[in-house]
Amino acid sequence: MSDSSFDTSEKKENEPPHSAICQQCMLAWHPVMDPIWVSISLAVFATFCIPIGHLFYMISNNIIEYTQVYDSHDHNLTCRITEANKNHSCTLNFRIKENMSPPVLLYYEITNFNQNHNVYMNSRDDAQLLGESAQTELGAKNCHPLNTLINTKTNSTVYINPCGLVANTFFNDVISLTPNVGYNYSLIEDGIAWQSDIDYKFRQPAKFKEKMCTSCNDAECICQPPWTCSSPYYNHNTDTCHLYSYPNDNITQYLYETYPDIISPLDGVQNEHFIVWMRVAAFSKFRKLYGYFDTPIDSGTSLSFNILANWDISRFQGSKALVLTTTSFIGGKRPQLGIMIFTIGYVSLFFAFVIGLKHLVKPRKMGDMKYLRYV
């Protein structure tokens, strides 16, 4: 056998370069736990944490927040309901005691509802939400048992679009600002969802069509094939009339049919209140943005909100509340964040003092052989 086969000077195929990083022989720093440097490091860390924690705590305390519970399983409140979808009307009044700078956010807060449950959060068909008409076997499995229902009139199967637990437990209380003489405020409900969700996660069905009419009384504004609407849709916001068509409408219950008081057939799954709901919360107590005010609200102002209560909480024994709040660069009113940061700072400062004092009173010589123990 020739010795050339053992020649290591030849470059092998796929051999990595002979560089420090590729051969994993870069210089490294191996720190030694010297008590002086440990004490100094803890002290420096504390000097950052303590003022930052107190700053965050002060900013949080400067946030103005008003909360009113309007439905609870253990309190007999004016908005309490025991049956869903009854449009029970009630009013909540907020008396503003301090000037509130914009944006002033309006949240609804829910307790004891676990959107983070694994079965619940996976009960959706993302392809369907993106406009796919044909449902895959996996999508149908994820949505079970809220994938189909039986039409009691025709005794036939009807497909739910969108399907699943998340979409079909949508928060459908309707909240509106009551006009008040002397105050000119408006509750804005656009721009409340993440723009990335609006752009990339929700689409009307692929074959959805709509057409705007000059007037609902137009001779051409009639719901006839190819339009699947039963009557033209009148948009109160723009004072316009529309014809629309959904694919397979005779065997499918779409979102606007499930929630006719909230979801427009022109918006469907692109309704921003629905998109906000579909981003599931991490905890059983959570808030979701309903709207906001982009003008200052002066001290002494009285804001009244009319609520049409439809979302029943009796089954899971939770509560519903309205929250009116200002905000800051660290978010809402969260004093726990500042408390946690400056507490860590004070603990670090304490240990820096203890380690430094111990080294001052009874120093330990680095590399002293008497500290070595052998088995």
Image: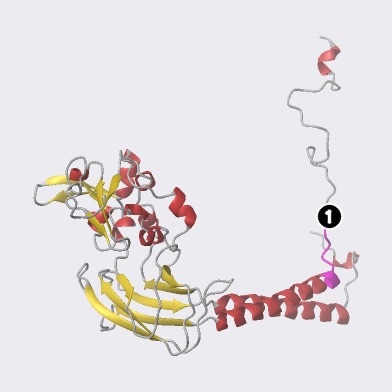
Magenta stretch secondary structure, dominant: loop
Quadrant of the snapshot with the N terminus? top right
Q: Magenta segment: does it hold 275? A: no
Q: Is residue 68 left or right of residue 215?
A: right
Where does the image place residue 247, in percent across and percent down from the top left?
25, 41
**Would residue 122 be visible to someone looking at this image?**
yes
Q: Nearer the viewer, residue 151 or 206?
A: 206
**Residue at figure coordinates x 39%, y 66% from the top left:** 189
Q: Which residue is mark 1?
A: 29
Q: Is residue 306 left or right of residue 15?
A: left
**Residue at figure coordinates x 30%, y 44% from the top left:** 208
User: The residue under label 1 is which amino acid type?
Assistant: Trp
The segment highlighted magenta reads: 29-37
Q: Quadrant of residue 29?
A: bottom right
Where does the image place residue 149, in percent across and percent down from the top left?
19, 50
Quadrant of the snapshot with the C terminus? bottom right
Q: Nearer the viewer, residue 327 or 33?
A: 327
Tell me if mark 1 has few (under 14), some (14-19) or many (20+) residues whose alpha carbon lies within 10 angstroms of its own: few
Task: Give above or below for 141 relative to 317.
Answer: above
Where does the image place residue 201, in percent across and percent down from the top left?
43, 49
**Residue at figure coordinates x 32%, y 39% from the top left:** 137
Q: Is residue 192 left or right of residue 134?
A: right
**Would residue 80 be visible to someone looking at this image?**
no
